[in-house]
Amino acid sequence: MSYPYYDCVTRAHTELLTEGKIKARTNQDEVEQDKGLVTRRAAYYANQLDPTHGLLAKTSGNNSQGYSVDWILRSTDGEGWDICTDDGSQALPLNGGPVGADPARIPDWRQPTAELAQLGGSGGELPPPPDQATADLILEVLETLQTTQDADTATILARDDANTQRILDTIDSIKTQVEESLRKVLLAYLVKRRREDEPVP
C-alpha cells in the first residue's frame, strides 16, 4: 500500500518549489536538505489529518535538522513510509509503500511543527486546499459579489447623474433670477438717470 496521505507530500513539494525554498542543486548535501524540508512539511500536513503521523528523529547519516530526510513515521506501531527521493539534483516526492512496523522506532517519533515545516512558525492548523465543489462555490460567490458591486456602482452613478442634473437646473434657475434682477435694477437706474437729466420746468 502506498502512503495514505501522499497528497500532503505533493502539496508540500509544490508549495516549496513555488516559494523557491527548494530547487535544482549542484551540491548533494543541499539536495538532502531540500528533501528534509519536503518531508518535514509533508509530515506537518499529514499530522493535521492523522496525529499519529510524524517525523523520524535521526542524528546520524543523511539527516536534516536532526530528522530523516525522507521518512514519515507512525507513532502507534513504528510503521514508516519513504516519501521523498531525488534525481541527483532536485528533491522529488515519492509514493513509497510501508517499510514494515517496528516498535523499536516508536521512541524516535517526533511531532511535526509549522516552524520545522517553514510555515512561519505559526503553530496553527492550516486548512487543506478546497475540493473542487468548494472552489466552484467560492468562484460563484465571488462572481455574485462582483455582479452586485457592478449594479450598486451603476445605481450610484445614476443617482449622481440625477443629483448633478438637479444642481445644474438649480444653477440655471438662480442664473435666470439674477439676470432678471439685474435687468430690473438696470431699468430702474436708467429711469432715474433720465429723470435727473430732464430739465426742471
Image (tube, helix red, strand yellow):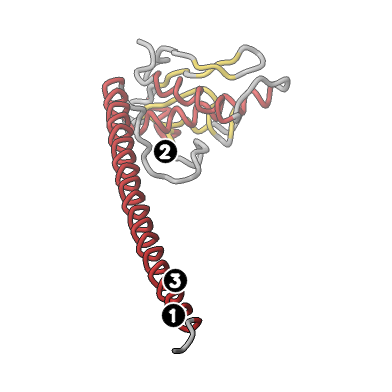
Residue 181: x percent and y percent?
38, 69
Residue 64: x percent and y percent?
59, 32
The numbered mark, 1 or 3, whose residue comes first in the sequence reads 3
Q: Nearer the viewer, residue 162 or 100?
A: 162
Residue 109: x percent and y percent?
42, 33
Q: Secondary structure at mark 3?
A: helix
Q: Nearer the viewer, residue 128 or 201?
A: 201
Residue 101: x percent and y percent?
37, 20
Q: Are marks 1 and 3 in contact (CB under 8 Å)?
A: no
Please rate how many residues cluster around mark 1, counting C-alpha atoms within 10 Å: few if below 14, some from 14 to 19, many from 20: few
- Seen from this angle, which residue lies furthest front? 201
In the picture provided, is 20 more to the left or to the right than 198? right
* Figure quadrant of residue 145: top left
Measuring 38% from the left and 25% from the top, which residue is drawn there? 78
Q: Nearer the viewer, residue 44 or 173?
A: 173
| Relative height, residue 51 to residue 165 (above, below) | above
Q: Which residue is mark 2?
A: 111
Type of amino acid at the residue the image marks with label 2: Gln
Marker disc for residue 186: 3
Q: Are marks 2 and 1 in contact (CB under 8 Å)?
A: no
